Amino acid sequence: MLELKQVTKQYWKKTALKEINLTLHPGEIVGLFGENGAGKTTLMKCILNFLPYEGEILLDGQPITYKNIEKFSFATCEHSFFPNLTPQAHKEFYQGQFPTFRNKRFDALMDFFQLPMRQMVGRFSTGQKNQFEVILALSQGADYILMDEPFAGNDVFNREDFYKVLLGILEPTETVLLSTHLLEEVSEFISRAVLLHQGSILGDVSTLELDEQGLNVLDYVKQTYHYQADRVSKALKELTGEEE
Amino acid sequence: MNGIARWIPVGADPRWAKRAILLGLLAGFVVNGGYLVRYLSAREALYTFERGVRELTDNIIEPFQVLLGRGLYGCWMAALAMVVLGWYYWQMHHRESKSVYLMRRLPNPYEYPKRCFSLPVFGSILFLTEGFLLWQIDFLIYWFGTPSTNLPPVSWTALWSIW
C-alpha cells in the first residue's frame, strides 16, 4: 500500500502540492487528472523521491529509499530510456538491475507493438518511443507503475490497443497511477479517479461509486471542477456581439 | 556489457572513452617534450666549439623550474578536462531523454554516480600520476644529464620550487 500523508511541495514561493493525503491499494488502476500545472507530475516525482517534499510518503509502512524503489516503475512523456541503446540492450540492462524483470512480458509487448529489437531507440518515431517507454515500465516487475502522460503523440488506435493490452496483462497486485488528459479514453479502464486542482486533491472517487450514482468520469470531473457548460456559447455570444 | 562499458554511462561509446584517456596521456607527454627541448638546448649552451673542439664552460645551467616551465601543463590540463568529462557524462542522462529518471530508480544507489564519475576520477588520478612521474623523470634528466660543475648550487631545492 502506498500512502501519502500531508505531502506538500513548494518551488520557491509557489505551492505545487498542498497537504496531499492519498492512499493507493494494490491492484488499483488510478487515473490522476487535473489541468496543466495542477501538480500531477510533481506528485509522481515526489513519490519517486526525485524531489524533496514535506510530509510523508510510505510504501507498505516504509519510507521510499533505494531499498524499495525497485517496486516503482515510471513511464514519462519525457522518456527515461537510453536513446543510444537498442531494446535488446535495454532488456539486458534491466535484467541486470531489476531481478523481477518480466522477460516474457517484454518480448510479448515488443512483438505486439512490432518494435524492432535491434534499432537504437533514439531513432524510433515519437509514438514508438512512447510505446517503448511504457513497455519498459510494465516489464520492470514493479508493483506500482506510475505513468505520466505516456501517450502524448500516439494516435487513438494505438492508445486503444494499449489500454486493452494493459487490462489483459496486469496482475491483481499491480497498481497503476496514470496521469493523463485523455479522460474519456481511460474512463472505461480505470478503477478510481483522483482530481488535482492547483496542488490540492479536489476529488477522489471509485468508478464503482460513479456507476452507482449513474455518472461517468467525465461528468464527475466536470461536476467537481464546476464546469460551466454554457461557457463557450456565452463567450461566442459576447464575441459575436462585439463584432456586430 | 564488459570492461570499460560498465564504468561509463549506458549507451556511451567505450571506444571514445578509451581514446579520450589515451589522448590525455599523449597530451601530457607531448607538452612535456617542450622541457626536453629546452633542457637539451640549455645543456648544449654549456659547451663551446673552438677550432672544432667541444669544450665545457664553467657556466651554470638554468634552474630546473625555469627549464621545466609549462612542461607539466599537458597533464594538469588533461586532469582538468576530466571535470568536463564528468559534466558531459552527467549531462548525457538529460539529453534526448531523461534517463536520469531510470538511473535514480535503480536499486543500487551507486550505479548512477559510478557511471558518471568513475572514468573522470580514474583519468584525473592517471594524469596527475603521469605529471608526478614526468616531473621526477625530468628532474633526474636534469640532475644526471648535467655535468655536476654546471649545476646550480641549490638544485635540490629547485625540484620542489615548482610547487
Image: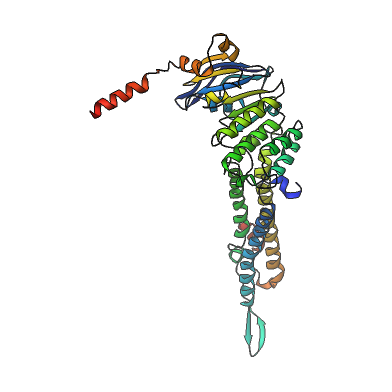
Position of residue B59 measured from the top left corner of the image (x, y, whole percent): 61, 75
On-image quarter of the N terminus of chain A: top right
Name the residue rendered at 45%, 17% in the picture: A225
Which residue reaches farthest bottom? B51
User: Which residue does the image show at 68% across and 72% down from the upper left?
Assistant: B149
Residue drawn at (55%, 22%) of the image: A32
- The vertical placement of B42 against A190, above or below, is below
The quadrant of the picture occupied by the C terminus of chain A is: top left
Seen in the picture, residue B154 relative to A79 is either above or below; the reply is: below
Instruction: Tell me the residue at 62%/67% (across/down).
Output: B35
Percent x, y of residue A143 = 70, 24
In the visual, does A37 lie left or right of A6?
left
Instruction: State the scheme by which the image is colored.
Output: rainbow
- Say if residue B110 shows up in the picture: no
Name the residue nearer the viewer: A96 or B50: A96
Note whether A58 is above or below B20 in the view shown: above
Front position in the image: B122 or B61: B122
* Residue A138 position within the rendered picture, expressed as x and y whole percent measured from the top left: 68, 31
Q: Is residue B36 visible?
A: yes
